[in-house]
Image: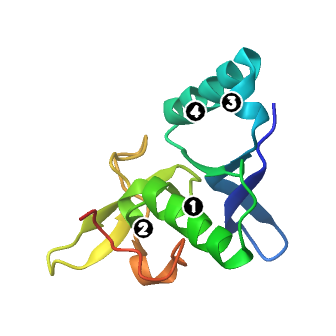
Amino acid sequence: MHFDFVIFEQLFTDKMSIMLFPVLFIEVNGSSHEETTEAIERDEFKQKLLEQFGYKLAIIDATKTIPDEELEQMVVKNIKDAVPSRKDYIVHCPVCKKPMIVKKNKNHEYFYGHEFKNSEGKYCPGINISDIAPLYDGIPVEGK
C-alpha cells in the first residue's frame, strides 16, 4: 500500500536527530479509481485505516484535464476540507512523542498540550500554538 503524498510534521529530538510524523495524507485519484472494484475497495481500506489512527486523507479528483490554476485551487480546497482547523490534525509532543491536542490556558490563549498525564502523574510542557507552523495560511484554531 502507498499514498501519493504525505505532509509531515518535523520534530527535532536533539541537535542531530529529526523525527517525522505524518499530518495529512493525499491521494490523487485518476479514472482507474472509479472503474475497478479492487481500486474502490483499496481506497476505502486506506480511508478506514487512517481514520482508525486519527489521520486525515485529502482526495484529489484527477479524472479530467484541468488548468494548473484550477488544480491548485482544487488541492487547497481538498486540504481545507480534510483539515478545517488546527484541532483536526495531529501534533506530536517533542518530549514524549505522543499526540497533543489544542487546549486553552487560564488567559484563554491556545496551546498544544496532552489530554492525559504521563505515568509520573505530570503533563509534558505545552507548546505555544504559534510555535507550530500551520498546515496552510489562515487555518483557524477551532472549526467554524
> At 67% across and 68% down in the image, what residue appears?
71
Q: Residue furthest top?
A: 37
The amino acid sitting under disc 2 is Pro
Mark carried by residue 47? 4
Q: Is 68 on the left-hand or right-hand side of 129?
A: right
Q: Is 87 on the left-hand or right-hand side of 68?
A: left
Secondary structure beneath dot 2 equals: loop
Q: Residues within 10 Å of mark 2 (few under 14, many from 20)?
A: few
User: Image quadrant for the N terminus?
Assistant: top right
- Nearest to the eye among marks 1 and 3: give it: 3
Query: Which residue occupies the foreground of this view, 49 or 106?
Result: 49
Residue that label 1 marks: 95
Q: Is residue 89 visible?
A: no
Q: Residue furthest right?
A: 16
The amino acid sitting under disc 3 is Glu
Mark carried by residue 111? none
Residue that label 3 marks: 34
**Is the residue 95 above or below the residue 106 in the image?**
above
Query: Which residue occupies the foreground of this view, 144 or 88?
Result: 144
Mark carried by residue 125? 2
The amino acid sitting under disc 4 is Gln
Choose the circle earlier in sequence order: 1 or 3: 3
Choose the circle earlier in sequence order: 4 or 2: 4
C-alpha distance separating marks 1 and 4: 29 Å
Choose the circle earlier in sequence order: 3 or 2: 3
The amino acid sitting under disc 1 is Val
